[in-house]
């Protein structure tokens, strides 16, 4: 390793996180799309995460502002993409995410369903599937935004049942509606619209839409890698591979196209940043944040040691490695939070970050409670500390 490489300290990495992830008050975004772009993509597996992640990064606005971006302006869209996970990305970035990640997932999903249809032995095949998909799109054109149950009522083919694993120990009968709808969404022919209920609901209505414009695959992966390096660098090839779910070959080709610079970290290892992005990051003003479960700032790296004390991981992550609601102070995870049944936001610090941290977290918890209002939030992936706090 060359000692001449620029040094990026742990403190500077945390400064970058506060500014580039728009968590420091002076760095907060004016629009929901800007908030999403700051971390490349917002996790969307849990409906509430999009809203709470955007809230932490917005200078102002309420849940209605996020709903407007998702359902009226469509400046933010959900895509099944990196790591076969649902993300919300800006409409400008969506074609690149679609080509770099979502296309391969859609192909695999279709192949899997056709295999199940063939093994079921009822004569259902690619032609039947194409007719079922066309009928769903016709129903959406006639009836407008519709839930999965409403589509099943309107399209007889969606009420078809098939047997998975016929004759085997795991044999089970299942409907095709969810699988056909998932395929159409993966192909970009339908998208999730306003759900039934509040902004915390996952009972989405579906609308007919056009697929995203095609982008050359190499160009798309390079664009994602470039943006990711800006948001998450210094980081490693392994971090990018974990975050995207791409093959190692695709990761290396994308990085070669970007041409990142190398920097030296305090532990003596090397990491990557975007081209020319080696200057020290000015420290933002002190900041606190209460981020939701699965927030990108906690899930952006395979190795999160620079902002998380390993001793705190068991309390803040579930058994599968999903992060729960976290409390941050100046770029470091210092605790966790939860919402009780009566709406109270409660939190606990792990360690002693000091009085200034406690005062800032108290103020941020009050801001979060005001923003959430009457809504009630239970993370989809619950962690030990979150469960303790709600009691």
Image (tube, rainbow, N blue to C red):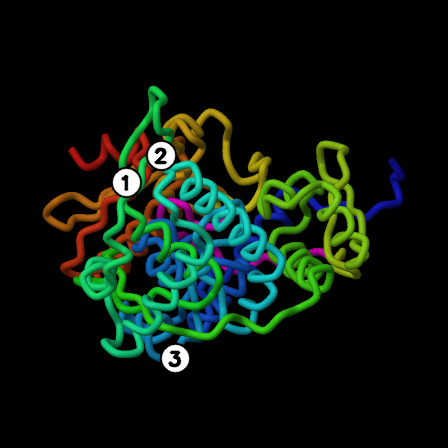
The circle on residue 174 is 1
Which picture quadrant has residue 371?
bottom left
Whichever of labels 3 and 1 marks the residue nearer the N terminus, that label is 3
Start and end of the magenta stretch?
279-297
Say which of 203 and 362 sits in front: 203
Query: Do residues under tags 2 and 1 come within 8 Å of each other at their CB atoms?
Result: yes
User: Is the stretch drawn in magenta largely helix, strand or loop?
Assistant: loop
The circle on residue 27 is none
Residue at the image position 41 percent from the left and 52 percent from the top: 288
Which picture quadrant has residue 96?
bottom right
Image depth: mark 3 or mark 2 in front: 2
Which picture quadrant has residue 148?
bottom left
Disc 2 residue crowd, few under 14, some 14–19, many 20+, Cα 10 Å: some
Q: Is residue 135 magenta?
A: no
Say which of 168 and 31 sits in front: 168
Residue at the image position 53 percent from the left and 45 percent from the top: 83
Q: Which residue is mark 3?
A: 73
Query: Do residues under tags 3 and 2 come within 8 Å of each other at their CB atoms?
Result: no
- Viewed as shown, does residue 185 lie left or right of 232? left
The residues tagged by marks 2 and 1 sit, at their Cα atoms, a distance apart of: 7 Å
Residue 291 visible in the shown view: no
The quarter of the rendered structure image containing the C terminus is top left
Q: Identify the element where label 1 is drawn.
A: strand
Q: Which residue is mark 2?
A: 164
The residues tagged by marks 3 and 2 sit, at their Cα atoms, a distance apart of: 40 Å
Residue 322 lies, in percent from the top left, at 42, 37
Q: Is residue 287 magenta?
A: yes
Q: Is residue 1 above or below residue 328?
A: above
The residues tagged by marks 3 and 1 sit, at their Cα atoms, a distance apart of: 36 Å
Whichever of labels 3 and 2 marks the residue nearer the N terminus, that label is 3
Residue 154 lies, in percent from the top left, at 21, 66
């Amino acid at each position: 390793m060359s000692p001449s490489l620029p040094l990026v300290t742990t403190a500077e990495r945390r400064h970058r996180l506060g500014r580039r992830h728009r968590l420091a008050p002076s760095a907060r975004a004016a629009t929901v799309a800007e908030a999403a772009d700051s971390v490349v993509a917002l996790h969307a597996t849990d409906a509430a995460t999009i809203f709470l992640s955007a809230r932490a990064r917005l200078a102002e606005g309420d849940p209605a502002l996020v709903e407007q971006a998702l359902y009226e302006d469509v400046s933010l869209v959900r895509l099944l993409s990196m790591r076969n996970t649902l993300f919300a990305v800006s409409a400008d970035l969506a074609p690149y995410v679609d080509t770099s990640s979502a296309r391969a997932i859609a192909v695999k999903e279709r192949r899997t369903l056709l295999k199940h249809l063939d093994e079921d032995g009822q004569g259902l095949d690619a032609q039947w599937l194409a007719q079922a998909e066309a009928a769903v799109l016709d129903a959406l054109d006639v009836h407008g935004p519709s839930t999965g149950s409403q589509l099943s009522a309107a399209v007889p083919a969606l009420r078809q049942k098939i047997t998975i694993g016929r004759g085997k120990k795991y044999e089970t009968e299942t409907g095709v509606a969810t699988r056909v709808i998932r395929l159409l969404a993966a192909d970009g022919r339908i998208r999730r619209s306003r759900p039934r209920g509040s902004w915390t609901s996952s009972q989405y209505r579906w609308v007919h839409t056009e697929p995203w414009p095609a982008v050359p695959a190499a160009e798309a992966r390079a664009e994602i890698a470039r943006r990711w390096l800006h948001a998450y660098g210094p980081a490693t090839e392994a971090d990018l591979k974990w975050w995207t779910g791409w093959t190692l070959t695709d990761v290396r080709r994308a990085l070669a196209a970007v041409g990142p610079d190398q920097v030296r970290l305090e532990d003596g290892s090397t990491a990557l940043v975007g081209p020319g992005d080696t200057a020290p990051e000015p420290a933002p003003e002190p900041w606190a944040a209460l981020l939701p479960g699965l927030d990108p700032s906690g899930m952006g790296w395979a190795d999160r040691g620079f902002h998380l004390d390993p001793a705190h991981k068991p309390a803040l992550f579930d058994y599968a490695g999903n992060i729960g609601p976290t409390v941050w102070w100046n770029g470091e995870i210092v605790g966790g939070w939860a919402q009780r049944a009566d709406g109270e936001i409660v939190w606990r610090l792990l360690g002693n970050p000091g009085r200034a941290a406690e005062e800032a977290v108290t103020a941020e918890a009050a801001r979060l409670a005001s923003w959430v209002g009457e809504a009630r939030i239970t993370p989809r992936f619950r962690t030990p500390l979150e469960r303790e706090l709600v009691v």
